[in-house]
Amino acid sequence: MRKFLTSTFAAALLAVAIPAAAEEGPALERQNWSWHGPFGQYDKAQLRRGFQVFREICSNCHSMKLVAYRNLGDLGFTEDEIKAIAAEKQVQDGPNDQGDMYARPARPSDRFVPPFPNDQAARVASNGALPPDLSLMTKARVGGPDYVYGILTGFKDTPPEGVTIPDGMYYNTAFPGHQIAMPPPVNDDQVTYADGTKATKEQISKDAVAFLNWAAEPELDQRHSLGVKTLIFVFVMTILFYALKRKIWARLH
């Protein structure tokens, strides 16, 4: 019996240790995100800039299959603007009355059109690596937005002494193993912001991460607002019930 319990305990420790070890990676610098904390909210101007970064840079390689064009209305885009943005892409539809598939401009109800027709085409264009879908990226990685920001800003032209990077790979301080197939995607002044924000590499990266976090958690603002209202309700009701309790017990005494 003792041997059985010892084996079971060891197996349980191993089961906990393996995922913990798998999650270990380079230390990430914590960033100050506007949506963090119980009162945090998205910065709509930053989200619009982030969409611009995704549209002009990220979408050349990465898909975002879980987000529809109409969702851009949450960022302040008008219906006409959304229609124009969607119409820039072609989607395959059908069959028509003749049984043929056909191409048409995307509509607001369509999901973001991926840059490649299939995964194999994406691998061929990306040095054999499959660019991940970005719909849930900030929720799918340990460290969340800090991890994605670390990847975008963690590229180094020269690896540390003694570290050899194979051809077609790039050194990145935030990526586990420090070897990544994605070339540095962001540089200073790579985009021109309409609101005049200075487009440094760090600013572009933060804006992109903010947009990706919104894509993964579009309901965050509403959830935080509801949480605050719930806390206020609970606080008020606690005071009322306490006052009622004192009144009832005062009669009994």
Image: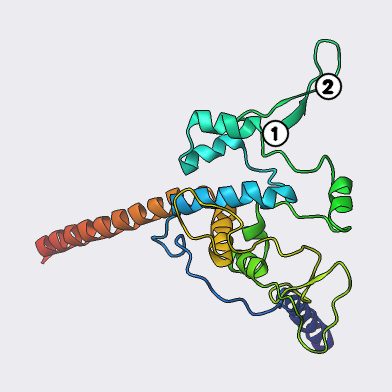
Q: Is residue 28 visible?
A: yes
Q: Is residue 215 visible?
A: no
Q: Earlier in the sequence, mark 1 or mark 2?
A: 1
In front: mark 1 or mark 2?
1
Q: Quadrant of residue 5?
A: bottom right
Residue 13 located left or right of residue 249: right
What's under tag 1, amino acid-wise?
Answer: Lys
Residue depicted at x 17% and y 60%? 243
Depicted 230 relative to depicted 157: above or below: above
Depicted 111 relative to depicted 249: above or below: above
Residue depicted at x 46% and y 57%? 197
Query: Counting other residues with Cα less than 10 Å from the Cα at mark 1, is it few (<14), some (14-19), or many (20 or more)?
Result: some
What's under tag 2, amino acid-wise?
Answer: Met
**Image quadrant for the C terminus?**
bottom left
Q: Which percent across, then down, holds residue 130?
A: 82, 55
Q: Secondary structure at mark 1?
A: loop
Residue depicted at x 48% and y 48%? 194
**Image quadrant for the N terminus?**
bottom right
Q: Which percent across, then down, holds residue 122?
A: 84, 49
Residue 196 located left or right of residue 152: left
Residue 16 located left or right of residue 153: right
Q: Which residue is mark 1?
A: 89
Residue depicted at x 57% and y 48%? 51
Q: Secondary structure at mark 2?
A: loop
Q: Label 1 to label 2, Cα distance in Å?
A: 16 Å
Q: Quadrant of residue 162?
A: bottom right
Q: Which residue is mark 2?
A: 101
